[in-house]
Image (tube, helix red, strand yellow):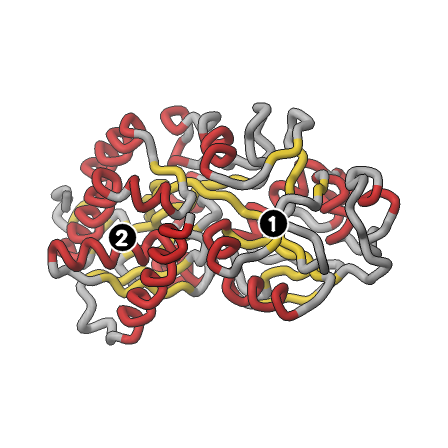
Amino acid sequence: MALSLRSFVMTLGVVTALASVSAQAADITGAGATFPYPIYGKWAETYKAKTGIGLNYQSIGSGGGIKQIKAKTVDFGASDKPLTVEELAKDNLFQFPAVVGGLVPVANLKDVKPGQLKLSGPVLANIYLGKITKWNDPAIAAINAGVTLPDAAIVPVSRSDGSGSTFIFTNYLSKVSPEWKEKIGSDTSVKWPAGISSKGNEGVASSIKQQPNSIGYVEYAYVIQNKMTYVAMQNKDGNFVEPDDKTFGAAASHAEWAKAPGFYEILTNEPGKDSWPISGATFILMQKVQDKPENGKMVLEFFDWAYKNGSKDALALDYIPMPESVVKLIEADWKTNIKDAAGKPVY
């Protein structure tokens, strides 16, 4: 994992440098989800070294990415919330999954080690509903025998921006808590009943590190980079599991991409003894009719390269690559769905 961390830190430097370059100077432009930011950055670093083609990716949240691709201000948008077939058709968009990863609850509790604290879905929902307000609440203590829990107020931390991570998190809470589903629901932005909010996975990670007795949710690469205390979660089968590529992969194994119209697939609360319950894919959004066909072609060539050459880097950062069978489905759909103004496929 030390190798993964070094790669991740190097990646952030590369992406930051790329982002500082003007859009005019960049060969490919993208914007959106912070969830896949680490792996897109690593791929960009390697791809530029091999091809000379750069990537300017703005990590602004899924909501921002959706807005920018609709406005045609970037070559591709990125979102952890998949758009429905109806939503895609409305704006003449096409989407495809890039990788699968895991959202991870993290806490800042004195003397509690990573994985030592356990939570169930209903308990996590009640924390964010503001119904469980102390760390030594009986509902938490009951599943944490032997863990010293402070008599301290819980500080829930959430995302303030339109976020696909928030969609995955609230989708999970809606599946495990009828009250959450009824009162709050699932979306990229919701009205949080309790706690504080920060922008981006980066902001949430920073807030939790600075705020004692807090809890929040971030993508797993941010857990590793920031050396955060992750929470073990009880999954649908009743087992407590820890976040890693094995448990993310167990959840991803239940995806049925071939049967999913518009590649619409949500992977929260999947069955299986090893499945991580807050897993999800992250998606690329593109205009079906490309005003700049060469740019569209470069985007698809980049992701074709990533599918075929980027799996090792994805696994090193604990993302799950798309299986070869799914990649074939995706690339076949590129040829029939992404075209120039004359109707000619750009790929």
Seen in the picture, residue 24 relative to 302 is either above or below; the reply is below
Give the percent coordinates (x, y) of residue 174.
Answer: 67, 41
Q: Quadrant of residue 111?
A: bottom right
Seen in the picture, residue 322 relative to 217 is either above or below; the reply is above
- From where the camera sits, is residue 18 visible? yes
Give the percent coordinates (x, y) of residue 164.
Answer: 50, 52
Three-letter amino acid code of the residue under disc 2: Trp
Q: Nearer the viewer, residue 25 or 277?
A: 277
> Would you name the residue on which mark 1 appears?
230
Q: Nearer the viewer, residue 303 or 214?
A: 214
> Would you name the residue on which mark 2 appears?
43
Three-letter amino acid code of the residue under disc 1: Tyr
Instruction: Report if the CB atoms under discs 2 and 1 are less than 8 Å apart.
Output: no
Q: Nearer the viewer, residue 167 or 319?
A: 319
Q: Secondary structure at mark 2?
A: helix
Q: Earlier in the sequence, mark 2 or mark 1?
A: 2
Q: Quadrant of residue 192?
A: bottom right
